[in-house]
Amino acid sequence: MATLYIGNKRYSSWSMRPWVLMKALNIPFDEKIFFFAPTIRQLAFDAFSPSGKVPTLALADGTVVHDSLAIVEYLAEDHPAAWPRDRAARAYARCAAAEMHAGFPALRSQCGMNVGLRVDVGVPDDALRRDLDRIDALWTEGLTRFGGPWLAGADFTAVDAFFAPVASRLQTYGLVLSADADAYARRLLAHPAVAQWVRCAAAEMHSGFPALRSQCGMNVGLRVDVGVPDDALRRDLDRIDALWTEGLTRFAGPWLAGADFTAVDAFFAPVASRLQTYGLALSADADAYARRLLAHPAVAQWVAEGLEETARCEMHEADVVRDGRKIVEDLCK
């Protein structure tokens, strides 16, 4: 079975395109997600991608295909439904997908993909307006010529998958097109494969950060010297730092999404506890946020009641001190 290497579902528009197409066409694949580090060069991607970028498709015979458009063309050799059957529709779809692949620089630079936010971008400048007008014209052309409901006719094909991240950006930034184009964007977002991508993105915290989870099991009663974090743990910490910094900066704190403590803060409360248990440091602003989390009355109550518990799970207690780690302090003694 093929393996598709992708970046964060929250951010990676390039990864979204082949993932959505493969899901829509029921092409089986294994998914390997690598979260972005807070650097321009993603060194971890070199392990699977010749270009050091996502997406990358790895085949069982050793073939590696990188770049979203190249992946789609490779898939189309065995799955011709990737492109429209009608020759004229297929020509339009390939041109529109190629334009999306290489164009719309203002939309890309000013409106980075982020499925988890809704942002007031204000009045689009001239460059962004030109991109939006061109997208509107492309979509209107396809819907008019080929009868909809998808860009090249009755079937969802690669050209729709290529524009799924655009529909996401329109939603994130509240950008409006003509009535028919807006209706198409809503259909795109409602497509099961696109909706699944968005749901997965929302669940990144719920299911992500595997190194932190596996190396730093939660234990509110101990303080442990974990030593120097390895590369996997460092990546998770850097990603948490970047996520927290983004929220605090964009929404002005003191909580991740603004003035009020909400579900996103509750989801990260166990992370703050792990940072405290294992003495793991983030940037100054992120560390300050972790301290606020631990001081919140609800979080503090959880920790206090955890310290009062007398039951112990030998497996969990042993895991904390694996690999020769030292307990610096036991708060229950």
Image (cartoon, rainbow, N blue to C red):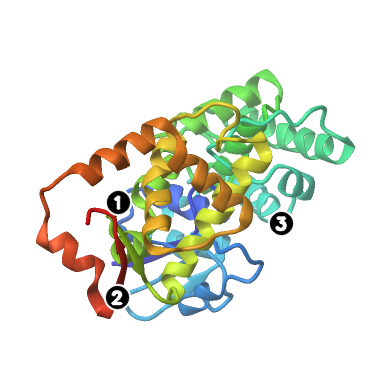
At label 1, counting other C-alpha atoms closer than 10 Å, the crowd grade (few under 14, some 14-19, many 20 or more) is: many
Mark 2 vs mark 1, CA separation in Å: 16 Å
User: Foreground residue, 53 or 238?
Assistant: 238
Side (left or right) of 90 relative to 206 = right
Quadrant of residue 309 in the image? top left
Residue where numbered disc 1 is placed: 220
Mark closest to the chain's N terminus, 3 or 1: 3
Mark 2 vs mark 3, CA separation in Å: 50 Å
Assess whether mark 1 and mark 3 are in contact (beta carbons under 8 angstroms).
no
The correct choice, above or below, for 1 with respect to 119 in the image is below
Eye-nearest disc, 2 or 3: 2
Mark closest to the chain's N terminus, 2 or 1: 1
Residue where numbered disc 2 is placed: 325
The correct choice, above or below, for 275 with respect to 56 in the image is above
Q: What quarter of the picture does the C terminus occupy?
A: bottom left
The residue depicted at 60 percent of the width and 41 percent of the height is 247
Q: Position of residue 15 (x, y in %)?
A: 51, 56
Q: Position of residue 14 (x, y in %)?
A: 57, 55
Mark closest to the chain's N terminus, 2 or 3: 3
Amino acid type of disc 2? Arg
Amino acid type of disc 1? Val
Q: Which mark is residue 102?
A: 3
Q: Secondary structure at mark 3?
A: helix
Q: Secondary structure at mark 2?
A: loop
Assess whether mark 1 and mark 2 are in contact (beta carbons under 8 angstroms).
no
Q: Position of residue 220 (x, y in %)?
A: 30, 51
How many callouts does the rendering have?
3
